[in-house]
Amino acid sequence: MSSFVVDLTDPTPPYEQIRRAILDQVATGVLATGDRLPAIRALAGDLGLAPGTVARAYKELEEAGVLITRRGAGTRIAEGAPVAQFNEDLQRLAETMVDAARTQSFGDEAILEAVRRALRSRPESPRQAPAGNGR
């Protein structure tokens, strides 16, 4: 079972932290198509949040096509949700960036936030096969 953490000192609303955590876990392959998520009340209890907070995160992900909820079957990762695609070239780029940031004494949270901000500030371009990847 995957775990979610909500930092109440973070200015990001808790529902958004849950939403992002689920998206990150889907993108990295921690959660895969068909995997069942905790029930809203159970997750809310585990995180010390109101059920409505978790429900909002789930609802937004359902609207985005990432989750599907069926009575009796629970909430699961939907077919067609983004799946992890490991790319060695991208991994090497990330490791180089992390090494450079750590050499300048940046901590992991600062590095993660910098990557998130960079992703948000640059619109995704049409997918192209990386050079030398043979695709």
Image (cartoon, rainbow, N blue to C red):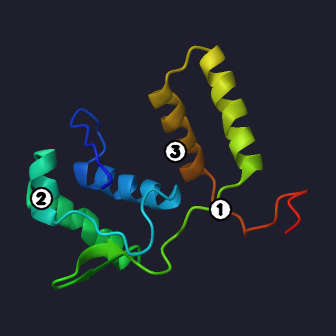
Q: Residues within 10 Å of mark 1 (few under 14, many from 20)?
A: few
Say which of 99 and 32 sits in front. Answer: 32
Between 37 and 128, the one lying in front of the other is 37
Q: Secondary structure at mark 2?
A: helix
Residue at 42 percent across and 61 percent down: it is 31
The image position of residue 99, as x and y in percent, is: 67, 24
Q: Quadrant of residue 53?
A: bottom left
Left or right of residue 67: residue 13: left
Task: Pick the residue in front: 34 or 14.
Answer: 34
Dot 1 or dot 2: first in sequence order is 2
Nearer to us: label 1 or label 2 = 2
Could you tell me which secondary element the residue under label 1 belongs to? loop
From what the image shows, is residue 70 above or below residue 18?
below
Task: Kindly identify the residue that appears in the image at 58 percent across and 50 percent down.
Answer: 119
Label disc, if present, on residue 124 of the rendered structure = 1
Give the side of residue 61 with respect to residue 119, left or right. Answer: left
Dot label at residue 42: 2
**Figure check: 114 above or below 81:** above
Assess whether mark 2 and mark 1 are in contact (beta carbons under 8 angstroms).
no
Cβ atoms at labels 1 and 3 below 8 Å apart: no
Q: What residue appears at the point 52 percent right and 55 percent down from the top-left corner?
A: 28
Q: Residue 116 shows which numbered tag?
A: 3
Q: Quadrant of the C terminus?
A: bottom right
Taking the view exactly as shown, the residue that stands out farthest to the front is: 1
At 48% from the left and 37% from the top, the residue drawn is 113
Callout 3 secondary element: helix
Residue 108 lies, in percent from the top left, at: 49, 27
**Amino acid on which the number 2 mark rests in the picture:** Ala
Q: Badge 2: how crowded within 10 Å, few (<14), some, or many (20+)?
A: few
Q: Earlier in the sequence, mark 1 or mark 3?
A: 3
